[in-house]
Amino acid sequence: MNTPAKKAANLTVRADLLEEARARKINLSHTLEVALTAELKRQREAEWLEQNKEAIEAYNREIAEFGLFSDGFRQFCR
């Protein structure tokens, strides 16, 4: 598995947070990568939902009107 290239970045962090993180031996680079990954995922998902909002609403209307194809086959809903 190839690890993506890393690049140095200068950041400004509240002094009290930095001091406590260092005292607790928190890996700042790793912590930022994890937080950025989660935030980027959240934003991509929100963008996808917004871009597909009309299609999702149309699908939901169709299901509300006609039901699911599998409705007649599900044993647990009878």
Image (cartoon, grey):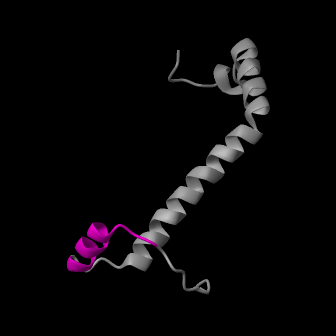
Q: Residue 50's x, y, as percent? A: 71, 38
Between 22 and 42, the one lying in front of the other is: 22
Residue plotted at (58% across, 59% down): 40
Question: Residue 62 versus residue 21: which sits nearer the camera?
Answer: 21
Q: Residue 56 at x, y = what percent?
A: 73, 31
Whether residue 35 appears in magenta in the rendering, the answer is no
Instruction: Name the image quarter holding residue 13.
Output: bottom left
Location of the N terminus by quadrant is bottom right
45 or 69: nearer the viewer: 45
> Which quadrant of the figure has residue 57?
top right
Residue projecting furthest to the top = 65
Please identify the residue farthest to the left as the structure is shown.
23
Prevailing SS of the magenta stretch = helix
Is residue 22 shown in magenta?
yes
Closer-to-camera residue (13/41): 13
68 shown above or below 13: above
Q: Is residue 24 left or right of residue 77?
A: left
**11 on left or right of 16:** right
The residues colored magenta run 12-23
